[in-house]
Image (cartoon, rainbow, N blue to C red):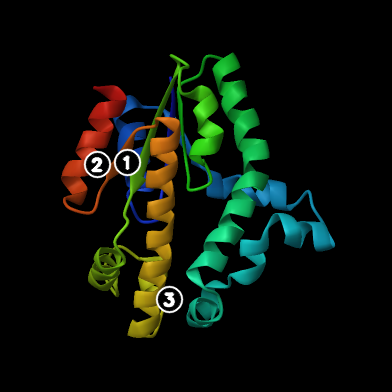
């Protein structure tokens, strides 16, 4: 069985994937780890065109990043990268199916418009996790700031105002996935109200 887990940032994709991999004793991979493989194939202007988010984003200048680019600009860049990364991700999924392997692939780049082709495949299970309310995301970031979770976003943004802007930017993703999942008839779980309980629900939907 191939498990495809996607959705908005900070909604629990990685947590669900790790829990599922441990429970089923199977491997998992994030689409973030496919990115550098494809990144190496392009050069110059083509690389910037295929990976605009990568060009825009610098982890040591996150306050500048969220002040410079609007939520719409950030989201648009990620959608372009998703299209680029899908080239490799789709080949991997098809290869895993051909080899009849059990595996988990997760990541924000697995858009509903791409995964719809696997919706009726009995060897594939798909679920999306979302958070859509900026204030809720902001509260979660505040709780993680300086904590034991090593939250790369909360710990690298210095300004509280920028942290709130980042949260509103991430909410754009959630709203997009809710709309796209409804359009293509894909399962979508909102993890805002009770994160732990909703992840358990998502896991149950995948493996019963």
Query: Residue 160 in the image: x percent, y percent?
Result: 33, 83
Q: Earlier in the sequence, mark 3 or mark 2?
A: 3
Q: Tell me, yes or no, whether the two marked residues, 1 and 2, touch with CB atoms within 8 Å.
A: yes
Query: Residue 191 in the image: x percent, y percent?
Result: 25, 49
Res 24 → quadrant: top left
18 in relation to 136, above or below: above
Image point 30% across, 62% down: which residue?
Answer: 149
Q: Earlier in the sequence, mark 1 or mark 3?
A: 1
Label 1: how many residues lie within 10 Å, few (<14), some (14-19) or many (20+)? some
Per the model, the C-alpha gap separating discs 1 and 3 is 24 Å
Query: Mark number for residue 16?
Result: 1
Q: Quickly name the residue at label 3.
A: 156
Query: Residue 59 in the image: x percent, y percent?
Result: 53, 72
Q: Helix, strand or loop at disc 1?
A: helix
32 in relation to 186, above or below: below
Label 3: how many residues lie within 10 Å, few (<14), some (14-19) or many (20+)? some
184 in relation to 135, above or below: above
Image point 35% across, 65% down: which residue?
Answer: 150
Per the model, the C-alpha gap separating discs 3 and 2 is 26 Å
Image point 82% across, 62% down: which residue?
Answer: 45
Image point 24% across, 41% down: which residue?
Answer: 199
Query: Mark number for residue 199?
Result: 2
Task: Tell me: 4 left or right of 15.
Answer: right
Mark 3 or 2: in front is 2
Q: Earlier in the sequence, mark 1 or mark 2?
A: 1
Task: Tell me: 31 left or right of 207.
Answer: right
Per the model, the C-alpha gap separating discs 1 and 2 is 6 Å
- Quadrant of the snapshot with the C terminus: top left
Q: Nearer the viewer, residue 32 or 127?
A: 127
Total number of numbered labels? 3
Q: Tell me, yes or no, whether the two marked residues, 3 and 2, touch with CB atoms within 8 Å.
A: no
Q: Nearer the viewer, residue 168 or 26?
A: 168
């Amino acid at each position: 069985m191939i498990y495809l887990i996607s959705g908005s940032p900070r909604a629990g994709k990685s947590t669900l994937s790790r829990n599922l991999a441990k429970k089923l004793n199977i491997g998992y991979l994030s689409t973030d780890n496919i990115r550098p493989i494809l990144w190496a194939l392009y050069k110059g202007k083509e690389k910037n065109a295929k990976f605009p988010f990568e060009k825009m984003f610098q982890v040591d200048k996150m306050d500048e990043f969220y002040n410079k680019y609007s939520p719409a600009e950030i989201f648009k860049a990620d959608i372009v990268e998703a299209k680029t990364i899908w080239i490799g991700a789709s080949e991997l999924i098809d290869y895993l199916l051909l080899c009849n392997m059990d595996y988990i692939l997760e990541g924000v780049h697995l858009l509903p418009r791409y995964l719809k082709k696997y919706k009726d495949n009995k060897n594939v299970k798909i679920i999306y996790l979302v958070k859509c309310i900026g204030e809720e995301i902001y509260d979660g970031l505040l709780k993680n700031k300086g904590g034991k979770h090593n939250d790369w976003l909360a710990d690298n943004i210095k300004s509280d105002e920028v942290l709130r802007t980042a949260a509103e930017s991430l909410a754009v993703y959630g709203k997009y996935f809710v709309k796209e999942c409804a359009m293509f008839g894909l399962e979508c779980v909102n993890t805002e109200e009770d994160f732990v309980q909703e992840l358990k629900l998502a896991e149950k939907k995948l493996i019963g």
